[in-house]
Structure formats: C-alpha cells, structure tokens
Amino acid sequence: MRQGPQSPLLLAIGGLIALAAAMGIGRFVYTPILPDMIAGGVLDGASAGFVASANFLGYLAGALIAASPLLSGRRTAWVVAGLLASAASTAAIAAFGTEAAFAVLRFIGGFASAIVLVFATSVVLDGLAVAGRGSLSAVHFAGVGLGIAVSALLVHMFKGEAFWPQQWIVSGVATLVAAIAVAFMVRETGPSGARSGFTSGSLNPDSRLSALMLAYGLFGFGYVVTATFIVAIVRDAPELARHETGIWLAVGLAAAPSVWVWSKLSATTGILAAFAIACLVEAIGVVASVASSHVAGVFFAAACLGGTFMGLTALGLVAARTLPVAGGASRDARRVVALMTAAFGTGQVLGPAVAGILFDRTGDYVAASVAAAAALILAAIIVTWILLSLRKTAATVRA
C-alpha cells in the first residue's frame, strides 16, 4: 500500500470492501449460520448468546485499543492486519466444536472488525475530506449491507445443519480475498499527522459529545437483539422458516443504500434530526420482528433494521466528528470514531446479557425486543436534546 494520490471513488470502494468483509461477513455471518449450528447440536440457546457476547466484547476491546496510542504506524496497515485476523478467526471456527473455542475465535473476530471499522473509516473520511468528496462516504458505509447480503448467499450455498463448518470456511476465504483487494486499493490520503496514529488535535470532550456517545451506546443496545437473533426467530416459526435466507438477504439489501438515503435526508433535516428519526424507525422494526407471525411483517422488520442500523452508524460518526467544540478547537478523527465505536460496543455487550435474562424468564424475545425499542426511543430523545441545545447556543450567539 504505497502512499500517493488516489481516486476518491477508488478509496471509497476500497473502504466498502473492507467493511463488507470485516463487518458484513466477519461480524454478522454468525447470524445466518447460528440456526444450523443449533440444529447440529454444537450450540444451544444459552451458549449461542455467550458466543455472541464474546464477539461483542472483542468489538468493544478493539475499539478501546484503537482509541489509544498503542496502535501506531500506518492506518492502512492496521486495516489489512484486521482483515487477515478476521479471515483467519472466521475460517478457524470450522476446526473446533466447543463453546469455549467458538467464544475465543469470535472474540478475535470482534476485535478485528472494530480495528478495521475505526482505521478504515478514519482513512476514508479523511481522504474524502481532503478531496472535497465527502458525499462518497455513503459508498464506504454501504459495505456493511453489501457484506450482509453476501453472507446470506455464502451460507445458503452450504445450507444444512451438517454443513456449518463449510459455511465458516467459505466466509473466511471471502474475507481473505477482500483483504488482498484492500491492500492494493486503500492508501493514506489524509493529513500527514494522521499516519502515525493520533493527530495534533485534541478530543475536547464536552456534555454534548458525552450525550451523543450515550445515545450511540443505546443504539448499540437497541439493534443487537434483532440483528443477532432474527434468523433464529424465523427458524423457530414453522410458517416463516423457509424464508430465513430471504429475510437476512433483505436486511443486507436494505442496509446497502441506507447510508445514502439517510445522508440525503440529513441534508434537509440535519444530521442529528435524521439520527433521531432513524432511531424511531428502527424501534418500530425491532417490535415488528416479534409482534408479527406473518411473513410480510417479518420482512418489514428486516427492512427497518437493515434500512437504519448502518445509516445510524454513519450519522453518529459524522455527527461526532462535526459537533461544534467550544473555543473552535479540533477533534482527532480516529479517537472520535474509536470512542463512539466503544460506546456502541458497550451497548452491544449489554444487549445479549439482558436478552438472555429476559429469554430465560419469558421463553421468547418479546420482552427483550421491547427493551431494545425503548433504548432506541431514549437515544432519539437524547439526540433531540443535543439538537435543541445547539440551536439555543446558535440563537444566543446571533443575539
């Protein structure tokens, strides 16, 4: 990955491939594979939640490490290293059959996906900002949805409880191919100070940024139950089981253009208002995933989930990078992305734990989904407060 000028579109496409592999496949392929692993007897409901939590914990750890100066050197090198670790940890699951081994490997996969998200996003957003092509960030973030759609097709190629090892292997191979492509496509194009890790800008946390991080964490809590268990929920409903591949594919296809859609909306409403609206739409989808036994209702839930969670991810990160700072100081892009990702990861870790407790008490995911929807509504309220606070400050300055 030599340094030098490069096409902004090529940079955005390289970021798309990186997120498709590390997040769409490496992070989310567990969802469509899980029902076959349960049917094959290698996991049960409780252990499935434990393995999922291990992945979320790895994601949180990766985000926290990325927020520190421990990972120095070129950001592009860390992107490729994360993709290679994701490929290896994904494929290696096929060689094991114990809950502990699955948890360790999914922890590594979660750690790697956070590293790729933080470093690839900071490289791409910095590069696009320098080129004056910030609108291409939608291409970069579309990678997660594309990767989810690809994961649905990869798993469907080897559908059946006896073929879960092949599902993990082919997913790992796909991630390896993506790592090779990214190594040739993504270069450092941001300010020179960004290449060594942290720039000279400080984080300058304030109450609004802290509130935004809290809202982002609530979003992580709010989406995770549906995103992790929607295929398992469908598998358990006889009238819906044959649609499980199509429903997960719908999540990915809805996610791919979602960042562009929400970016267009935010140009009219503002980023924070768009974030609040997306939280409310996702809350509706989360409730719909357990409130309807009709196939149309579950596809609606899949569309709401896919159509919002990557839009929310992008809107939250962009909002954090552009949130006004007292005194006109700057915020370091990598640290902001990393700490927002850590807040999101914290919500992800707590989500399955709460869902597991509620599932044990109720025998279904209804109560957990209601709690998740409530978290999303609270996130919308917090972001609305930030928006009103900014407007009040702006009015005071004008006066």
Image (cartoon, grey):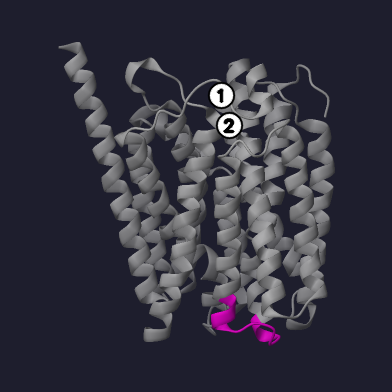
The residue at the far left in this view is 399
Quadrant position of the C terminus in the picture: top left
Q: Label 2 neighbourhood size at 10 Å, few (<14), some (14-19), many (20+)?
A: many
**Pointers 1 and 2 in contact (C-beta within 8 Å):** yes
Where residue 56 appears, as percent x and y from the top left, is 56, 60
State the residue at coordinates (59%, 80%).
47
Q: Give me the C-alpha separation between circle 1 and circle 2.
A: 6 Å
Residue 291 appears in the figure: no
The quarter holding residue 179 reads top right
Amino acid at dot 1: Gly
Task: Note whether 388 is above or below 255 in the view shown.
Answer: above
Label 1 element class: helix
Taking the spot 63% from the left edge, 24% from the top edge, the residue there is 194
Look at the picture and state if 365 lies above or below 394: below
Stretch of the chain drawn in magenta: 38-48
Kindly tell me whether residue 273 is visible in this rendering.
yes
What amino acid does circle 2 point to?
Ser
Q: Tell me what residue is drawn at x 57 percent, y 33 percent.
A: 334
Disc number for residue 137: 2
Q: Name the residue under label 1.
A: 134
Indicate whether residue 46 is drawn in magenta: yes
Indicate the secondary structure of the residue bearing disc 2. helix
As drawn, the label of residue 217 is none
Relative to 24, 297 lies left or right: left
Classify mark 1: residues with Cα within 10 Å, few (<14), some (14-19) or many (20+). some
In terms of image quadrants, where is residue 120? Answer: top right
- Whole-percent x, y for residue 35 in the image: 63, 77
